[in-house]
Image (spheres, grey):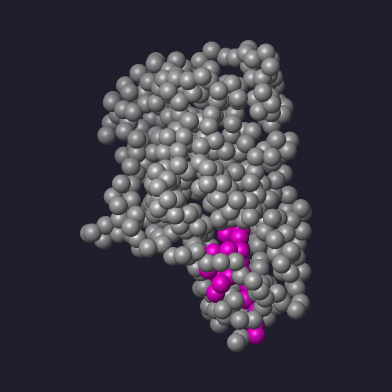
């Protein structure tokens, strides 16, 4: 049994259970030193994701402390920070959970090569996904570009049984120095919005497991239908915890299979949604341009508006388009850090099609404001809505936000929950929006609600004309 410590490098895997890297470190033997780095990847994060990551790291640190371990915090480029820790601790191995976005892949490859050149045991482990992207291929050896055949290819695959929580965390006899999480100020950009959003955060591994259990016990049965009704708490809400690895997809998968075996029909849709998440990572791995360019390159010629200062764009970001479904969803995101999936489709379609704006504007706004931000899911969702992505919604499908509201919020429960203007006694959620937004926006609950900046029917007609007259 080696006596040298293993550095366990935490990233978006903020848990103890079902953690293959931790399991491998314990099997290797010797002390285990958990480490979290404010490295180049963390510094790239935008406002809400950075804040939520800081909360998650703090929750993990508390869990480790309660079990006799610690989370060591260091800043700097990953390779340099890890090499400094190796010198200080005499570590013989560095283990971590695998990431799949191009920035992380390049960083991790460089770290692994450098550490192996020093004679260290440097390994990455699967666990953020159920299926490694390179393990799912078409019959001709390529990657899947459409979801339905991807689903058929993986739905009957064996998914490894989740690992348990380690009992002995093997702490070292002497700990290296650690920075203080509060000094990092990861939530500085949230300003006064932090206290508004914080009550809507479900933080940490234990809370994530409780959330999964509650969903399977009482909501998964009706999930197939309830997930489309924004006024109903009919979804799992696990995207927040999955994004930071506070729970794993295979833990969710096996819970879904048990529910399906119990005859809960909605579990089938839940399993499909887990695979949709996998599909996004599959595409991001094989075609990284999904994150920053039109996945369908012919859409590079489409004349989308890219002016973020345009008054229509500003109205969209502030929930003042005059289209209630759009505005309610945008305000929900500002108050809770999340947005109902039906709302995401409506606001994305409205921005890209009714307002003819580039999907990157919306993708980046979501990246600023979502606490469940996920690089693959966010970019895939926006490109799907715009029509430029894989398995995209057809260009001629333009969601009418008015008829969508009649269908999915007939009694206006959702709209009234989030839009204060026009109500004599608006609910707390609607009023909270005005406490979360920047004061310079100078908005108040007793303002007059605006007329539509673009009429729903006229916007649809304009979008169809532009799409039908495109040069490709």
Res 111 → quadrant: bottom right
Q: Which residue lies furthest to the bottom in this view?
A: 1
Which residue: 39% across, 15% down?
A: 458
Res 223 → quadrant: top left
The quarter in which the N terminus is drawn is: bottom right
Which residue: 51% across, 48% down?
A: 216
Estimate the x, y position of residue 428 in percent, counting from the top left: 69, 26
Estimate the x, y position of residue 161 in percent, counting from the top left: 46, 65
Name the side, left or right, on which 251 lies relative to 419: left
Estimate the x, y position of residue 214 in percent, counting from the top left: 56, 46
Q: Give the camera-side residue of 462 and 308.
A: 462
Q: Which residue lies furthest to the left in this view?
A: 140
Q: Is residue 99 placed above or below 125 in the rendered structure?
A: above
Q: How many numbered discs?
A: 0
Q: Give the camera-side residue of 89 and 308.
A: 89
Instruction: Tell me, yes or no, whether the highlighted magenta stretch contains residue 5.
Output: yes
Residue 314 visible in image: no
Name the side, left or right, on which 100 lies relative to 66: left
Residue 417 visible in image: yes
Which residue: 45% across, 57% down?
A: 254
Q: What stretch is highlighted in magenta?
A: 3-24
Instruction: Tell me, yes or no, whether the highlighted magenta stretch contains residue 286.
Output: no
Q: Give the camera-side residue of 293 and 365.
A: 365
Which residue: 66% across, 66% down?
A: 35
């Amino acid at each position: 049994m080696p006596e040298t410590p293993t550095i366990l490098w935490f990233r978006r895997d903020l848990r103890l259970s079902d953690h293959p890297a931790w399991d491998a470190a314990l099997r290797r033997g010797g002390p285990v030193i958990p480490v979290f780095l404010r490295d180049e990847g963390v510094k790239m994060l935008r406002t809400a994701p950075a804040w939520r990551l800081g909360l998650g790291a703090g929750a993990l640190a508390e869990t480790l402390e309660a079990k006799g371990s610690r989370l060591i915090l260091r800043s700097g480029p990953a390779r340099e920070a890890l090499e400094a820790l190796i010198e200080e601790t005499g570590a013989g191995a560095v283990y971590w959970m695998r990431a799949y976005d191009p920035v992380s892949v390049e960083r991790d490859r460089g770290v692994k090569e450098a550490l192996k050149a020093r004679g260290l045991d440097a390994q990455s482990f699967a666990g953020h996904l159920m299926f490694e992207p390179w393990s799912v291929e078409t019959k001709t050896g390529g990657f899947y570009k459409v979801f339905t055949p991807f689903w058929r290819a993986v739905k009957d695959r064996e998914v490894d049984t989740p690992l348990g929580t380690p009992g002995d965390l093997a702490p070292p006899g002497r700990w290296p120095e650690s920075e203080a999480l509060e000094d990092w100020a990861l939530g500085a950009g949230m300003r006064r919005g932090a206290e508004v959003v914080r009550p809507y955060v479900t933080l940490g591994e234990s809370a994530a497991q409780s959330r999964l259990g509650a969903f399977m016990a009482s909501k998964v049965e009706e999930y197939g239908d309830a997930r489309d009704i924004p006024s109903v708490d009919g979804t799992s809400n696990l995207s927040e915890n999955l994004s930071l690895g506070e729970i794993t997809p295979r833990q969710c998968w096996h819970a879904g299979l048990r529910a399906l075996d119990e005859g809960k029909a909605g579990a089938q849709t839940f399993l499909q949604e887990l695979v949709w998440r996998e599909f996004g990572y599959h595409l991001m791995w094989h075609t990284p341009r999904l994150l920053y360019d039109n996945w369908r390159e012919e859409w590079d010629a489409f004349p989308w508006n890219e002016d973020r200062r345009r008054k229509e764009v500003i109205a969209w970001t502030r929930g003042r388009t005059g289209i209630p479904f759009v505005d309610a969803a945008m305000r929900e995101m500002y108050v809770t850090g999340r947005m109902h999936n039906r709302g995401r489709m409506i606001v994305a379609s409205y921005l890209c099609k009714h307002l003819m704006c580039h999907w990157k504007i919306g993708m980046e706004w979501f990246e600023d404001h979502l606490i469940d931000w996920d690089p693959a899911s966010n970019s895939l969702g926006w490109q799907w809505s715009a029509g430029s992505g894989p398995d995209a919604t057809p260009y001629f499908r333009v969601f009418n936000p008015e008829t969508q509201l009649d269908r999915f919020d007939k009694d206006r429960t959702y709209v009234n929950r989030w839009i204060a203007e026009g109500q004599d006694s608006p609910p707390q959620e609607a009023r909270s929006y005005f406490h979360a937004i920047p004061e310079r926006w100078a908005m108040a609950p007793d303002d007059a609600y605006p007329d539509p900046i673009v009429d729903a029917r006229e916007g649809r007609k304009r979008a169809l004309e532009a799409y039908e007259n495109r040069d490709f």
